[in-house]
Amino acid sequence: MAGGPGVYVFGQEEAKELAEVIDGKYLFRYGLMEDKNFKKKVFTFEEEFKRKMGADYCVATSSGTGSLMCCLSAIGIVPGDEVIVPGYTFIASISSIILMNAIPVLAEIDESLTIDPEDVKKKITDKTKAIMVVHMLGNQCNMDEIMKIAKEYNLYVIEDCCQACGASYHGKRLGTIGDVGAFSLNFFKTISSGDGGAVITNDYDKYERAFGFHDQGHKPNRTGVEVGNRSIVGMNMRMNELTGAVALAQVRKLDDILTTLRTKKAKLKAMISGLEGFTFRKINDEQNECATLLTLIFDTKELADKFCAEVKSKTICHSGWHVYNNMEQILSFDGGKRYHKNMLAQTDDILERAVNISVGVVDGGLGSAFGININSTDEEIEAVGKRIIEVVSRITDRG
Ligand SMILES: Cc1ncc(COP(=O)(O)O)c(C=O)c1O
């Protein structure tokens, strides 16, 4: 089955939270705290999520895309502002910037498959307002360098944590290092409520703006129809109680999910370490990534293609989603003036040699249809490891 680790471990916990909401017949995220039928699942999810992440504030939303727009609103983005974003990411990182009438400026990735700080510096202009870093494939961006650059040039940092819920970097959970962090709870994420999302921040003003943006400009946790107290316009990106119920059960499983994924990934990685023909993607904080994927970067494009043909997978550049070259809406967005195919040579070179092996995220759209999942047994992990060894040995003529 395709999906993320969260949905692979659905069980009685999600069912219990959902049943409580259904029993109360009250599905809206707002209600009177003293109302027995109001089960406060979204509110409780926000409380537990922010505590788990070590953030002061959290807004639950209906998607990761909505969360990113809330983050952009939270930092006060205005039309014409430039936001630097990597060319390897899900389209929503880029489209959320366009939808806020700001300008995405595409930057290269490095061998961690996350934004290259050296290229970020080259892309800064007097219009740059923010850097949107994307913690791709569960891996942390090089946040020490990014925060240094942001400080030097007085830029905001938005962390797109949609693919890296729960990972941390040098002791801090992702989403709490920059100004605001965005999360997705869609079907393919570390934890999932089908769809859904969250925004976290440590700054009250940004929280208030993010909250208002997700709900017609209202102040946090309104209790009714409030008029006269709204400073911004927003749109409905609210999470409902059914989604909140599942999200709540899932956030309680997050640390166990991460522990399991890290153990299984370590096992698979150890089995295939030392083979010639590829290196592993650089991980910026090895012990604390999500471990949802194991990425091989082959020495040549030819080797990567041969490997994929054997295991019926695709190199990342051909996996469909997540690569700027495959985003025709972005490439044609301004008549091809700012964006065009193959504009990021370093990114293209890495992605045509890179192959994702699933550990917890099984997703053909990410190029990870081959591999293991969170429930794989030791025997299954060994079988996948042996298959990788056999194929790599053969295509490198070392078999
Ligand atoms: C890096 C990244 N950003 C943003 C999103 C958007 O999240 P959603 O699908 O919940 O809108 C995703 C989802 O795939 C993602 O992977």
Image (cartoon, helix red, strand yellow):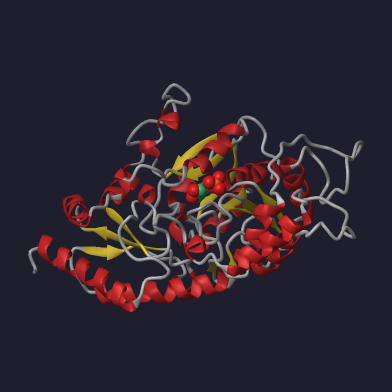
In depth, the one of 278 and 259 nearer the eye is: 259
Left or right placement of residue 2 versus residue 51 in this view: left
Q: How many marks?
A: 0
> Which residue is nearer to you in this view: 334 or 25?
25
Residue furthest top as drawn: 335
In the rendered view, does 200 fall on the left or right side of 380? right
Q: Locate residue 47: give its quadrant.
A: bottom right
Residue 252 rendering spot, x and y as whole percentages: 63, 70
Please say if 274 is above or below 366: below
Q: Is any part of residue 366 visible from this angle?
A: yes
Quarter residue 72 falls in: top right
Q: What is the residue that sits farthest to the front in this orientation? A: 23
Q: Picture coordinates of residue 73 (x, y %)?
A: 69, 41
- Decide if residue 174 is on the left or right side of residue 58: left
Q: Does residue 258 lie above or below 205 as drawn?
A: below
Residue at left 75%, top 51%?
Answer: 207
Name the foreground residue: 375 vs 163.
375
Pick the quarter of the image with the N terminus: bottom left
> Where, quadrant-wise, is the C terminus in this rendering?
bottom left
Expressed as whole percent of the image width and height from the top left, the position of residue 320 reads 35, 42
Residue drawn 57% across the image and 49% down it: 195
Residue 197: % across, % down:
62, 51
Asked if residue 367 lies left or right of residue 387, the reply is right
Can residue 180 be seen in this snapshot?
A: no
Q: Is residue 17 above or below residue 272?
A: above
Query: Which residue occupies 23% across, 58% down?
Result: 298
Above-or-below relation of 276 to 329: below
**Residue pushed farthest right?**
228
Q: Residue at x 31, y 73 (%)?
A: 381
